[in-house]
Image (spheres, rainbow, N blue to C red):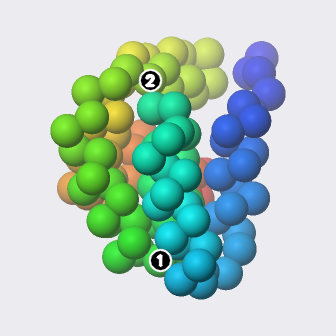
Amino acid sequence: EGGSPSASFNAYKALSSKGVSETLAQSLKQQMKEASPAGKLYFACALWDLEKAAGVSAFKSLLSDTSSVKYITGCEVSNETVAGIAKSFLERGAFLDFPTKKYPQ
């Protein structure tokens, strides 16, 4: 059986359900700079869900980040890089089965 969603994932889902404002977008971009590797991706996904152009900008800023993250889906765990996941969003609009508003699970 799968585990519970992480606190970071739950925060992402809460953020992505809000309406976008310039203040919120700027706050997310600032917090993204100081976040963990997974946190950076969650912030970029939240921006993507709120306003695609802001998400594209956020993912582009992560293309040189070679930090490692573990991606868990079901019982499978894979090691990915922040840059690799960002590239996937920019090229395909999604990463594997990650549930964004545009590509819900």
First reached walking from the N terminus: tag 2 or tag 1: 1
Q: Nearer the viewer, residue 6 or 93?
A: 6
Side of 7 relative to 75 (left or right)? right
Spatial separation of the CA atoms under disc 2 and disc 1 = 24 Å
Residue drawn at 25 percent across, 56 percent down = 60
Q: Amino acid at mark 1?
A: Glu
Mark 1: give few (<14), some (14-19) or many (20+) Cα within 10 Å: some
What SS does tag 1 mark?
Answer: loop
Q: Nearer the viewer, residue 98 or 85?
A: 85
Residue drawn at 77 percent across, 21 percent down = 3
Image location of residue 46, percent across then percent down: 55, 60
Residue drawn at 29 percent across, 45 percent down = 62
Side of 52 relative to 14 (left or right)? left
Question: Compared with residue 28, is residue 62 higher up or lower down, i.e. above or below?
Answer: above
Q: Any mark on residue 69, and which?
A: 2
What SS does tag 2 mark?
Answer: strand
Image location of residue 14, percent across then percent down: 75, 59
For the question of whether residue 21 can be seen, the reply is yes
Side of 32 relative to 101 (left or right)? left
Which residue is the site of mark 1?
51
